[in-house]
Image (cartoon, rainbow, N blue to C red):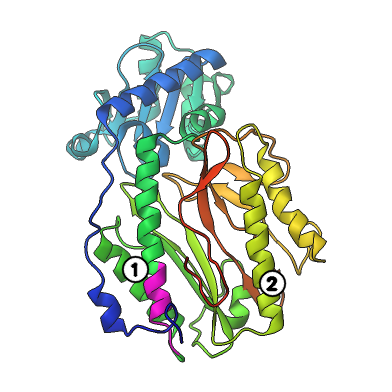
Amino acid sequence: MNAQIGHLTLEQARTRLAPWPQRAPAISAEEHAQRLQRARALMRAQGVDALLVTAGTSLRWFCGVPWGGSERLVAMLLTLEGEPLLVCPVFEEGSLDAVLRIPAGKRLWEEHQDPYARVAEAMAERGARTLALDPEAPFRVQVGLAAHLGADAIQSAASLIDGCRMCKSPAELALMQQACDMTLFVQQLAAGIAHEGIGTDTLVRFIDEAHRALGADGGSTFCIVQFGHATAFPHGIPGVQNLRRGELVLIDTGCAVQGYNSDITRTWIFGEPDAEQRRIWELERAAQQAAFDAVRPGVPCEVVDQAARDVLEAAGLGPDYRLPGLPHRTGHGCGLAIHEAPYLVRGNTLPLAPGMCCSNEPMIVVPGRFGVRLEDHFHVTADGAQWFTPPSPAIDRPFA
């Protein structure tokens, strides 16, 4: 097809796969200690005595434990004074010790015991009366805690945790940069092996294989590959599609490096674009650039969303979420979670600040025909924004 699309065989693409040569360092013990200090400063400012962080991305952020949640309570209890406490089943203690990255005490519980009682006991020992609870905690955790503390003693820790995690450190930015570099390389190889008749399932398998070969955590964290009319559905439709000339290809995928995520979308033409495909693609690129240009410290998140919409509405698309047009927000935060605060959406007046990381993806959907999404991430700098990956230059040349 050309030097970027359809120029590789699968075997040629595989020869280019090798462990990533320049790996970002892990988060240091010093930085983990600073995170706890930051949380305590916010707790004091908000008048909170204790913070409970349950298994998930925030537990990993605070103490390095990369576990997902289950029906068994695994959590970190942080009070204003004293060492952090890890609440964990007794039989999991050895596994916990193998991944724990901070000095911490433990409050272990046996299978027949009430773990929420262990939290309440620890709080009482330290004179803590009010608890900020991880907003990602299941409802059963809140119910269990309320039985011991009273519902009025529990509040959401959303603003506290977001206040800790939203602005990334240089070490976090380096891990995200590596993840983005790896996924962009995989996107380039995926475009390279495209040929008439190839199935979406083949590309999904190759993308996962490539992420694994480069050294990502467990391969692709997600992968959406859609052709033709299926590209009009932002998150795709079920079933295998086989590529035909003249169709748009949308690939949205990412990986994780030490838990930190990439999330990149490319949309390009297989063959020659018609006039409408080219027009919509160029509008998408202009909207993405307008959103990027609107970014600077102190600007409300919603302003970035509106900047993209202004471009589309001036071209007769929309308005608002109407189609043809942009059916969703312009972007989301990214870090240890693929989607996290801050969100670039109308009504979010949170000011942008250096270190915040967001996707920029003002997708255009033309119902019944096709969709175009270009997604790159940026981080806010002292005077604007910086891309993690260079945006696509053209519909038939997806990579800079």
Q: In the rendered view, tell whether residue 177 sits above or below residue 124.
A: below
Please, what secondary structure does the residue beneath circle 1 have?
A: helix
Q: Which kind of residue does numbered mark 1 sit on? A: Asp
Residue 186 figure quarter: bottom left
Which residue is denoted by mark 2 in the rendering?
280
* Disc 1 residue crowd, few under 14, some 14–19, many 20+, Cα 10 Å: many
Q: Is residue 154 magenta?
A: no
The single residue placed furthest to the top in the displayed view is 127
Q: Position of residue 52 (x, y in %)?
A: 43, 27
Which residue is denoted by mark 1 in the rendering?
208
Q: Which residues are magenta?
A: 187-195
The residue that appears at 81% across and 61% down in the rendered structure is 314
Judge left or right: residue 297 versus residue 110.
right
Q: Position of residue 138 (x, y in %)?
A: 49, 40
Residue 7 figure quarter: bottom left
Q: Position of residue 21 (x, y in %)?
A: 22, 56
Viewer-proximal residue, 339 or 195?
195
Residue 336 figure quarter: top left
Viewer-proximal residue, 61 or 84?
61
Viewer can see residue 331: yes
